[in-house]
Image: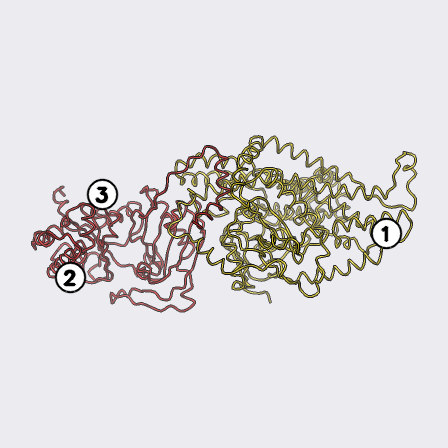
């Protein structure tokens, strides 16, 4: 395959992505490739590259339209009106792609398995893209036509009022944006959640924090339930604390129907730990490996579902550098160990004054 | 303040403080005594009690129950141990080393239980003014630690030998003629009283030594923990303890000697003699008859002093006995080791493995620290490891060796009082406080000298009354704290007890947590296991412990060491992160929850329990039928 044709390729399966750069496949896909490189299991899937986006925008003449609509929209109200107009434009155009149809067919072995369609953002602001509304995720999408439709929906999120404002904030022309889309088989999860390889509250680099719920991760990600929380020592992999929450319901995937059901959990089910100790250990070990390989704290989404004849197999759904680290003031330079000791002994007093002040 | 950078947003502590101010602890003088315990105050020296005279000051302090060291009602006599240690530790903090954090620490007895308080500085300027003093004084000890520690051991050994040499004379009808021929000039009455005064003074002095270096060892340890936690706030107590684990400790020597004697018994072919059961006398007789038995007995004789001066409890109470008093304990333990050796099990502490693991783990935590903190961490680690042996070993030299001898001396004094007919039993003596004990001994000596009756009725009825009062006090469930709700906790002692503002909040919430099926304590060794409980109240019962059981005991001491190879987890009433059991459990990698205060009362042998060493909780899952 020549370089030119590779660059133009509209769809790549995840294993094919290899070292494809972020401009073609987006941050989310790059993260998944990294997981594959580390021989970790991710649900099978493919990437709709930015080449497809560009081709479609050109074919529909949307690039020009978008640019025109955005021209001179400096204030909030005008931006919102432009975003609405662009949204309608996108809604009105369908995407035809043999490459997507073929990739979906292969992914489902000819059937119509439910897939997740997720935006895979481009640009230096990948880490911050969640703030810019570029994190569209559509679950339980079935059939090639539906997949294509939701790919367009992901693209449309590029021109939400938030995304436009955010690009302007970064000094990037509002019309200049591209996006890749990841399509993956849904995991009919027994449990799912997130893992931070550095504790997101205290930013303790020795603590991995896992939040987990029964079934799909949707109620957890949506903040609808309090998840189980496991804090793990990154060095010894000992569980520092486990807080098992009462989880009133769980979302379950009905694979045949391609829909999720919200199921009320019985009192005993709801108070059961969503993960076994072994699973907490396995996840933590992966988190530790991943962080070392990438060289940065990671934020990982995962699910446990059937595979290889087991009912509970661990899949990683996405991994990205963890954001939100508080700024650390420069460390006070203490001249001697004794000075440190004094500070340590008087620390509780310092905390007290801080609280009082 | 840079220790606070990791606290995002609103301080959770602020909320706690707000919540706390809404409630309070009972004022010490408002706490009621249980029925039948009226007049309990008279049992103790008045300076140990909350008083009307100082009620304003006392109500303004935060007093917490020391259930960790003194879980039961104080025998009037035994308070002398805490009198000695509280006077020592508080002076070291406030008057000798000027340790920052709190000005001093105070103690009071309430309904027979010991309460402690940190005495805060009234103004911060005072604390600040003292800082250079602290730095210079503590610095001197840290710089000369090894030499001072060697000196310390020599001092304590000499003092203990002095104690051992104190004579407790019987009071004969007529003095031995040597009293005359030697021109001694004083009678046994004087010796008895002088000896008692010297033995008590000896205890008070040994406690001066007890905290001479120990407080600084706490400081060095706390320093490492604070430094590590400033960067790695989620570090558990176990992880922190592991930084200084695996060192060679004399506290383990008694157990090492038992293992050596077990091996020797197998070598000499006398293991059968040791394990055939019966009384200590019968075992000894069998060994004497065996051609190689004499050799084994000589080997044991050689190590008995000091290594069998090991209390079967904490050493802090008169009723605890030592191996040396009752050889059945070490002999049973040796039997246990022989059995395990015969099964081909390894009985040695895997020390080099532990050290390698410790260093590997420490390196990994260190690598997680920001680069600019690593040098400070290395220094703190070095210091903490330097002081670590003293933190453990002082316990053998004082609580075990010295106190074994001390309590045995006190029993002899008690015997003299019983001989004189002023008390019925040895045990009765310990119902008198140390001043009254001096009086009853004076009465003993004086009535002997004057050949006149002593106050038999007075002393006996006093003891009778007190036996009832003590029983009544035992029914009192101690308040976790009395007095003022603290606005901050700064003292070294409170830190050593692991009391935080969260603890204070939990105590204020008190009643909501009354759950007789769940106990909390210090999670001293990580892991979660379930299994049948085996409640062991004394080392006589130690051989009843079966493989896979969960040991539930009052306290933990070196004499319990043999049991750790068998049990699946350990739960105790008394003990903390750095106690003997904690160290052994971490080494054997079995969970431990220590210092629960009430495990031996709430758990029964055969109960199915879950021990969660990570969280420091024990749950009774199913009661034994």
Decide if residue B170 is in sight here. Answer: yes
Measured as percent of width and height from the top left, residue B90 is found at 62, 43
SS for callout 1 = loop
Characterize the local packing of mark 3: few (<14), some (14-19) or many (20 or more) Cα atoms within 10 angstroms: few
Q: Quadrant of the C terminus of chain B?
A: bottom right
In which quadrant of the rendered view does residue B386 lie?
Answer: top right
- B216 and A247: which one is in front? B216
Select label 1 or label 2 by which is in front.
1
Q: CA distance from mark 1 to mark 3?
A: 96 Å
User: Residue drawn at (76%, 41%), measured in percent from left and top?
Assistant: B198
- Do marks 1 and 3 both belong to one polypeptide chain? no
SS for dot 3: loop
Taking the image as shown, residue A299 lies to the left or right of residue B421, namely left
**Closer mark to the observer between disc 1 and disc 3:** 1
Q: Eyeballing the image, is B203 above or below B551?
A: above
Q: Spot the yellow chain and give its letter.
A: B
Q: Marks 3/2: CA distance? A: 29 Å
Chain holding disc 3 = A
């Amino acid at each position: 395959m020549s370089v030119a044709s590779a660059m133009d390729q509209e769809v790549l399966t995840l294993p094919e992505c290899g070292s494809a750069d972020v401009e073609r496949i987006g941050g989310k896909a790059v993260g998944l490739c990294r997981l594959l490189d580390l021989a970790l299991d991710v649900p099978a899937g493919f990437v709709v590259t930015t080449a497809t986006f560009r081709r479609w925008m050109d074919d529909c003449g949307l690039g020009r339209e978008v640019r025109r609509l955005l021209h001179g929209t400096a204030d909030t109200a005008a931006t919102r009106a432009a975003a609405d107009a662009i949204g309608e434009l996108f809604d009105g155009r369908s995407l035809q792609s043999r490459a997507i149809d073929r990739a979906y067919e292969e992914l489902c072995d000819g059937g119509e398995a439910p897939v997740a369609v997720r935006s895979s953002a481009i640009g230096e602001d990948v880490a911050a893209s969640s703030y810019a509304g570029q994190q569209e995720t559509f679950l339980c999408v079935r059939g090639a036509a539906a997949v294509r439709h939701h790919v367009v929906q992901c693209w449309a999120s590029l021109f939400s009022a938030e995304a436009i404002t955010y690009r302007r904030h970064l000094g990037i022309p509002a019309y200049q944006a591209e996006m890749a889309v990841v399509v993956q088989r849904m995991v009919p999860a027994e449990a799912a959640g997130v893992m931070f390889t550095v504790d997101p509250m205290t930013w303790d680099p020795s603590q991995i924090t896992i939040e987990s719920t029964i079934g799909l991760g949707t109620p957890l990600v949506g903040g609808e339930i309090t998840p189980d929380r496991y804090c793990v020592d990154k060095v010894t992999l000992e569980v520092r604390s486990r807080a098992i929450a009462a989880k009133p319901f769980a979302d379950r995937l009905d694979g045949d129907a391609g829909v999720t059901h919200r199921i009320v959990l019985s009192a005993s089910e709801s108070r059961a730990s969503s993960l076994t100790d072994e699973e907490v250990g396995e996840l933590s070990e992966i988190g530790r490996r991943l962080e070392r390989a990438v060289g940065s704290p990671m934020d990982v989404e995962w699910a446990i579902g059937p595979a290889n004849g087991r009912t509970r197999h661990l899949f990683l759904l996405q991994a990205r550098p963890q954001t939100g680290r508080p700024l650390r003031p420069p460390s006070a330079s203490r001249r001697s160990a004794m000075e440190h000791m004094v500070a340590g002994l008087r620390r509780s007093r310092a905390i007290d004054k801080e609280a009082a002040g | 303040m840079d220790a606070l950078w990791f606290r995002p947003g609103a301080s959770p502590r602020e909320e706690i403080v707000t919540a706390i101010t809404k409630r309070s602890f009972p004022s010490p003088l408002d706490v009621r005594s249980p029925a039948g315990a009226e007049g309990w105050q008279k049992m103790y020296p008045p300076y140990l009690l909350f008083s009307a005279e100082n009620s304003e000051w006392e109500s303004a302090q935060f007093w917490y129950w020391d259930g960790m060291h003194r879980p039961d009602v104080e025998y009037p006599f035994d308070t002398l141990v805490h009198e000695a240690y509280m006077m020592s530790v508080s002076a070291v903090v406030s008057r000798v080393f000027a340790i920052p954090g709190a000005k001093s620490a105070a103690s009071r007895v309430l309904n027979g239980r010991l309460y402690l308080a940190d005495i805060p500085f009234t103004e911060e300027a005072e604390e600040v003014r003292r800082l250079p003093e602290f730095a210079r004084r503590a610095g001197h000890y840290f710089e000369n630690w090894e030499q001072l520690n060697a000196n310390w051991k020599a001092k304590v050994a000499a003092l203990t030998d002095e104690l051992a040499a104190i004579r407790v004379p019987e009071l004969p009808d007529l003095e031995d003629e040597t009293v005359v021929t030697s021109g001694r000039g004083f009678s046994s009455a004087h010796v008895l009283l002088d000896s008692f005064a010297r033995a008590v003074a000896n205890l008070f002095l040994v406690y001066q030594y007890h905290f001479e270096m120990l407080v600084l060892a706490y400081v060095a340890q706390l320093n490492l923990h604070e430094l590590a936690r400033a960067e790695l706030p989620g570090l558990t107590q176990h992880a922190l303890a592991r930084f200084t684990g695996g060192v060679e400790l004399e506290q383990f020597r008694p157990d090492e000697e038992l293992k050596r004697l077990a091996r020797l018994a197998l070598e000499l072919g006398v293991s059968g003699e040791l394990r055939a059961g019966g009384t200590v006398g019968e075992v000894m007789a069998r060994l004497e008859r065996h051609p190689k038995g004499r050799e084994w007995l000589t080997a044991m004789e050689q190590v008995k002093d000091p290594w069998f001066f090991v209390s079967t409890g904490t050493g802090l109470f008169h009723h605890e006995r030592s191996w040396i008093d009752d050889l059945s304990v070490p002999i049973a333990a040796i039997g246990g080791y022989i059995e395990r050796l015969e099964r081909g099990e390894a009985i040695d502490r895997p020390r080099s493995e532990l050290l390698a693991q410790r260093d590997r783990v420490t390196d990994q935590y260190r690598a997680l620290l920001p680069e600019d903190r690593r040098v400070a961490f290395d220094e703190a680690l070095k210091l903490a490891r330097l002081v670590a042996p003293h933190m453990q070993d002082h316990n053998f030299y004082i609580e075990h060796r010295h106190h074994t001898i001390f309590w045995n001396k006190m029993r002899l004094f008690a015997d003299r009082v019983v001989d004189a007919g002023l008390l019925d039993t040895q045990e009765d003596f310990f119902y008198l406080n140390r001043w009254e004990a001096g009086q009853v001994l004076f009465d003993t000596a004086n009535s002997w000298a004057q050949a006149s009756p002593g106050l038999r009725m007075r002393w006996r009825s006093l003891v009778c009354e007190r036996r009832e009062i003590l029983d009544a006090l035992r029914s009192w469930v101690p308040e976790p704290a009395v007095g003022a709700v603290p606005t901050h906790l700064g003292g070294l002692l409170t830190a050593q007890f692991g009391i935080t503002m969260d603890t204070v909040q939990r105590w204020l919430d008190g009643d909501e947590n009354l759950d007789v099926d769940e106990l909390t304590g210090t999670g001293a060794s990580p892991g979660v296991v379930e299994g049948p409980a085996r409640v062991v109240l004394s080392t006589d019962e130690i051989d009843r412990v079966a493989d896979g059981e969960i040991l539930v005991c009052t306290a933990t001491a070196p004499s319990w060491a043999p049991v750790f190879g068998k049990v699946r987890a350990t739960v105790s009433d008394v003990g903390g992160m750095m106690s003997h059991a904690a160290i052994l459990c971490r080494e054997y990698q079995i969970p431990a929850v220590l210092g629960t205060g009430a495990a031996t009362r709430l758990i029964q042998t055969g109960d199915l329990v879950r021990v969660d060493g990570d969280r420091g909780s024990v749950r009774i899952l199913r009661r034994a039928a």
